[in-house]
């Protein structure tokens, strides 16, 4: 998938759910998780349409009913009969995520995929659980899951599980020259880039997220 596949907007921030309790919290978590599924499905259909449509048939009913707005991306797919997905939010979320993960695996068998997740520690619990499932499914098809998080930040329990079961690389900060390249790609050939790069390096220690 493209670079934009899973950047901040694909997963709802944990903070959105902190003030929600009981059954309402369960409903909010389900909607938050569906945001991630919808974002990924949109990119999958956009970037690998032949493979995505070819493999969708077995999962269309569950996904269209369980993910709000997904049916609008699939005009050629008939809406499923009511009751295809479980009524209980937790069970429905599990079934939708399982269907989506298997759909992605089927696509990856036809076309290798790379999924990029920025700030994985900020994912809602449901989306984090889906990432764990995608990680476990990596041995079934050629897809690579790459996620970033700040050092020392744990995130939801599912994210902690994902970290423990993954290969980890500590990224070094960008040097001044690399910051100049980043600034040029962002703002163009503007004056005083070197001076700004020096200041950003001193303030953010080369961390791109703190530099922009």
Image (spheres, rainbow, N blue to C red):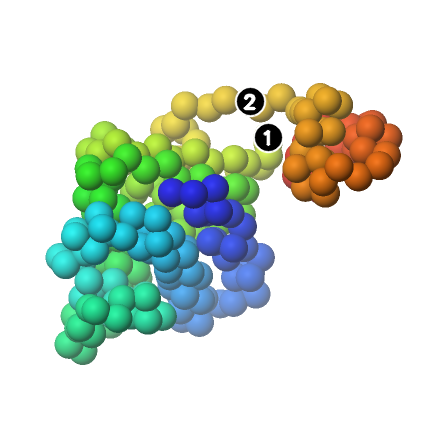
Residue found 26% across the figure and 32% down from its top:
142
Does residue 85 sit above or below 111 in this rendering?
below
Residue extending farthest to the bottom is 82
Residue extending farthest to the front is 189
Q: Is residue 141 left or right of residue 4?
A: left
**What is the secondary structure assignment of the residue under circle 1?**
loop
Q: Position of residue 2 (x, y in %)?
A: 43, 43
199 and 93: which is toward the camera: 199
Residue found 46% across the figure and 24% down from its top:
168
Callout 1: 10 Å neighbours few (<14), some, many (20+)? few
- Tags 2 and 1 touching, CB below 8 Å: yes
Residue found 47% across the figure and 36% down from its top:
147
Q: Is residue 206 left or right of residue 125?
A: right
Quadrant where the N terminus is found in the figure: top left
Does residue 79 sit above or below 13 in this rendering?
below
Q: Position of residue 71 (x, y in %)?
A: 29, 70
Q: Is residue 112 left or right of residue 161?
A: left
Residue found 71% across the figure and 35% down from its top:
184
Does residue 63 sit above or below 173 in this rendering?
below
Residue picked out by circle 2: 170
Say if residue 49 shows up in the picture. Answer: yes
Measured Cα–Cα span from mark 2 to mark 1: 8 Å
| Chain-order first, disc 2 or disc 1 | 1
30 and 50: which is toward the camera: 50
158 and 148: which is toward the camera: 148
Residue picked out by circle 1: 151
Q: Image quadrant of residue 187?
A: top right
**What is the secondary structure assignment of the residue under circle 2?**
loop
Q: Is residue 93 left or right of residue 24?
A: left
């Amino acid at each position: 998938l493209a670079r934009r596949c899973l950047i901040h907007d694909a997963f709802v921030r944990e903070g959105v759910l902190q003030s929600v309790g009981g059954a309402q919290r369960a409903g909010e978590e389900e909607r938050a998780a569906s945001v991630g599924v919808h974002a990924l499905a949109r990119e999958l259909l956009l970037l690998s349409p032949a493979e995505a449509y070819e493999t969708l048939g077995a999962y269309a009913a569950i996904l269209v009913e369980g993910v709000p707005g997904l049916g609008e991306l699939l005009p050629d797919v008939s809406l499923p009969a009511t009751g295809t997905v479980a009524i209980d939010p937790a069970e429905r979320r599990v079934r939708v995520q399982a269907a989506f993960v298997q759909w992605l695996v089927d696509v990856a068998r036809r076309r290798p995929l790379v999924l990029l997740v920025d700030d994985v520690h900020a994912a809602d619990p449901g989306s984090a659980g889906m990432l764990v499932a995608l990680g476990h499914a990596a041995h079934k098809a050629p897809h690579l899951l790459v996620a970033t998080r700040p050092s020392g930040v744990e995130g939801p329990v599912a994210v902690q599980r994902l970290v423990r079961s993954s290969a980890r690389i500590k990224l070094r900060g960008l040097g001044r020259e690399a910051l100049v390249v980043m600034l040029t790609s962002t703002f163009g050939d503007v004056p005083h880039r070197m001076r700004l790069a020096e200041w950003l390096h001193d303030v953010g220690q080369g961390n791109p997220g703190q530099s922009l």
